[in-house]
Amino acid sequence: MSSTGHAALPVPALARRSPALKGRVRVPGDKSVSHRSLIFGALTIGETRISGLLEGEDVLNTAKACAALGADVERVGEGEWRVHGLGVGGLRAPEGVLDFGNAGTGSRLMMGMVAGNPITATFDGDASLRRRPMRRILDPLEQMGVVVVDAAEGGRLPLTLKGPQELVPITYESPVASAQIKSAVLLAGLGAPGETTVIEKEASRDHTERMLTHFGAEVTVEPYGEHGRKVTLKGRPELKPAPIHVPADPSSAAFPLVAALIVPGSDVVIEGVMTNPLRTGLLITLKEMGADITFENERVEGGESVADIRVRASALTGVSVPAERAPSMIDEYPVLAVAASFATGETRMNGLSELRVKESDRLAAVADGLAQAGVAYRIEGDDLIVEGTGAAAGGGTVATHMDHRIAMSFLVMGLATDTPLKVDDISFIATSFPTFLPQMRGLGALIDTEALAA
Ligand SMILES: O=C(O)C1=C[C@@H](OP(=O)(O)O)[C@@H](O)[C@H](O)C1
Ligand SMILES: C=C(OP(=O)(O)O)C(=O)O
């Protein structure tokens, strides 16, 4: 096992044409909310109780990093955690390197968290995370007074940050719609006197803003332009512990959901899925494509809207997905490309430049995967066009490039291809959806691993 827990050797898997998927499933807790609940818990004085925490490798690395900064982080049951925080500005210098494994969210948010403390900390991760851009976080943090003591080429990991005695609050217009950039600046802003403002031209997921309010900080959110937002935080609040219930992750729900759409005769309910409007781009798109998706038992849980999502196999038609929808479904494009392969006609996904800087270059990885499955596609600039015919041949081997979403997307695809589809390494699925295999098999999915691992 590597330091972050997944097997050092690749674990291949083969997905086969499956009988109709049936049943109910509750996918694990939302990854974005899980990271944030630990981070905010560590910034309050007193005990925060978390239920439904995603116990995937990415989040477990955040838990370890919070503990290394002096918070008392304890697992008390399945998905049940307790965090005793140190208050804004109260973090201690960690003894070793903070290893975030595969996680962009954990590493970037915690750079902002550390910034408001006069301490030095080194951030590192696996080969995938070391390739990802961190300048987008370092730029605003430097404006606030943080010193980048050391960094790999281009400001990448491993890197060392030193928080100043006194942070400077800023107004930052983010060059990309990224909740990670917004959250890092706001987390740093907690430690700055006065108001810190982040402007984004397109609204990204708002879990940080919601959680700041939940823990007692003063946050105002105003519309900005046609699709954007301006978020302002009053610095140096005393955050108060508050219980968190983590709803099921819509980005994980996307896999059984698309599987049920493309495997003929399927009828599946995915329970308690977060339906925050800044996360529902995939559902909107699939409905436009003709998907039979209904929300049942809609309710509010822990401050987020949730629903049981019923999905039945459907004949899909290609659509054009507007670029401004990307932030609300940024992690769902790989699996949308799978759904688009089984649709009739072209599906055009516009404005996917951010996909190039995820755990892998997802635009390239999806394109290669489609080619392995015999699906026709074109890339025009930052747009991906899938030429759906209602069926896909399968037969090839998909390279996952240390990317959980590529692995899960193409395993889903293989459940409906004419011949089986192989995926070269499924070990990274544990970063976000550790129960993927048993839960998909529980619905009837045919996915083999053992025979291939020999
Ligand atoms: O803030 C978050 O929790 C996340 C934001 C998104 O990244 P970007 O901020 O880079 O768009 C998303 O891809 C990631 O999985 C989770
Ligand atoms: C992009 C993702 O995560 P992160 O940026 O946290 O690595 C993801 O989960 O698809």
Image (cartoon, rainbow, N blue to C red):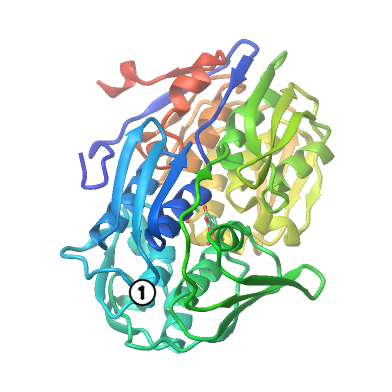
Residue at left 40%, top 70%?
88
- Label 1 residue near ligand 1, CB within 8 Å: no
Residue 271 quadrant? top right
Residue at left 36%, top 55%?
128
Q: Position of residue 105 (x, y in %)?
A: 45, 58
What residue is disc 1 on?
Answer: 89
Q: Is residue 109 above or below residue 365?
A: below
In this orientation, which residue lies closer to the viewer: 408 or 399? 408
Residue at left 63%, top 68%?
177
In this orientation, which residue lies closer to the viewer: 301 or 114? 301
Q: Return the residue found at the far top.
A: 19
Residue at left 62%, top 36%?
254
Q: Tell me if I can see residue 407 in this picture.
A: yes
Q: Position of residue 130 (x, y in %)?
A: 33, 63
Q: Is 319 displayed left or right of 119 in the figure?
A: right
In this orientation, which residue lies closer to the viewer: 154 or 112? 112
Q: Quadrant of the C terminus?
A: top left
Tell me how many marks there are.
1
Q: Position of residue 373 (x, y in %)?
A: 56, 32
SS for callout 1: loop
Q: Is 104 displayed left or right of 24 in the figure?
A: left
Q: Is residue 322 above or below residue 296?
A: below
Density class for disc 1 (Cα within 10 Å; few <14, some 14-19, many ≥20) is: many
Q: Is 142 displayed left or right of 382 in the figure?
A: left
In this orientation, which residue lies closer to the viewer: 292 or 143? 143
Q: Amino acid at mark 1?
A: Gly
Q: Tell me if I can see residue 132 in this picture.
A: no
Q: Is residue 64 above or below residue 296?
A: below
Q: Position of residue 226 (x, y in %)?
A: 82, 71
Q: Quadrant of the N terminus?
A: top left
Q: Is residue 23 above or below residue 197?
A: above
